[in-house]
Image: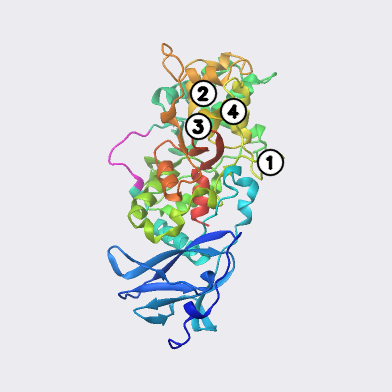
Amino acid sequence: MFGSDRNPARDAGRVSTAGMVLLPIQFTWPYGGDDVSISGSFNGWTELVRMSQVEGCPNVFKAVCAVPHGSHEYKFFVDGEWRHDEQQPHRNGEYGIVNTFDTLPVPAEVSQHQIPAVILNQTIPRISEEDLRASRYQISAFLAAHTVYELLPESGKVVALAVDLPVKQAFHILAEQGIPVAPLWDFYKGKFVGVISASDFILILRQLGNHGSTLTEEELETHTISAWKEGKARRNGQVDGHGRPIPRHLIFAGPGDNLKDVALKFLQNGVATIPVIHSSLEDGSFPQLLHLASLSGILKCVCRYFKHCSGSFPMLQLPIYAIPLGTWVPRIGESSSRSFAMLRPTSSLSSALNMLVQARVSSIPIVNDNDSLLDIYSRSDITALAKGRVYTHNLNEMTVYQALQLGQDSNSPYEPRTQRFQMCLHTDTLLKVMEQLANPGVRRLVIVEAGSNRVEGIISLSDVFRFLLG
């Protein structure tokens, strides 16, 4: 420690930051005091920045300083004495023992073509690599310490379908129940063997629309779910050496599984729903279907736990444009590493179904000629097509606008259903976006420009969990 005659905040010359990109960095002094300040190489050691006491934590002081990118030294001035934090990186410097840190460069994933042009000239907030690791560790530890039991509602209804049910009847049931997916029960095997979802209906509609289809509308009346699944396996080449379909293993979770493992199961398998199944017997016989788990349910648990202490997690306060998160609309002349699909109201239903399959997304924004958001077309809209017997129509002749009308009262005019999709701004914090995505049925958020509602990007539940779990 050096004496008062070597005052770094007095001796050093001011560093010019003109033209630099300044990154807001949060500093913490957790060891108490009455009057705490900070200074460092980021402000040329010429200014003492007063630190504020954290409410409810009398020994913790915090301050946010604008820092240029690079390597920096800093010290704390506590009750008239220069001190360093021994728990943080430190070294011997010109002013004795000083703490050190490096600001994170903008990750390669967040190249400028992924950031909307309207914010390219704005300061990009960042946090230290240490804070980022610490926040991810805390969230990962929370998920590992909590189980699927916490996702189970006090009461509710779960619909399962028999595998020998005709395909047409199955989709009418899904439409009537207002659900996009249902587990499949095999009475002969005495267990759940898979799920049927909107994705299956998409494939069936596309197959019916193809010339030379092997499946006719009449066959939908008698064609069972199991027969359809076997046929799909054969078409995809999923057969053994004797030409028999290879059964796919059911992706499921038990009520005692931890939430981190289940979240990773969602990401690794690319599924939207995982059945929660319990059996009191060791051989797994007589299984009980308890719930259909989703990433939104897991995210709701995270938000509920971290919401009231989010101030201690700088990562949650970052605006989404400063995070490698989601898919952004590429600017003219630039390419994007991830496909971004949009539809017009006059786009054909066939093109919408193809986009859902090819882009492997849950929903697609519907925009006007100015790329302003009007509505979305999602996989949950697919089962509504059963009501209108769309499989009897030419999918190239039906528009997305007409398809959306099938999900509404036929006696009322079509209106965009803003309650079915949610929007956010690129300046919204990660925590705010997480809270929106935690709402039931919301799997993607459309990022729009304030005022014009022009689409700037998309953030999905999977995007958020890939970022949180690192």
Judging depth in this view, the residue of 265 and 75 nearest the camera is 75
Q: Residues within 10 Å of mark 4 (few under 14, many from 20)?
A: few
Q: Position of residue 121 (x, y in %)?
A: 59, 50
Q: Is residue 125 magenta?
A: no
In the image, residue 360 above or below residue 369: below
- Residue underneath mark 1: 241
The CA span between labels 4 and 3 is: 33 Å
Q: Give the magenta range.
A: 151-158
Q: Tag 3, which secondary structure?
A: strand
Pointer 2 or 3: first along the chain: 2
- Residue underneath mark 2: 167
Q: Is residue 156 magenta?
A: yes
Q: Which mark is residue 197?
A: 3
Q: Residues within 10 Å of mark 3 (few under 14, many from 20)?
A: many
Pointer 2 or 4: first along the chain: 2
The CA span between labels 1 and 3 is: 29 Å
The CA span between labels 2 and 3 is: 11 Å
Judging depth in this view, the residue of 330 and 3 nearest the camera is 3
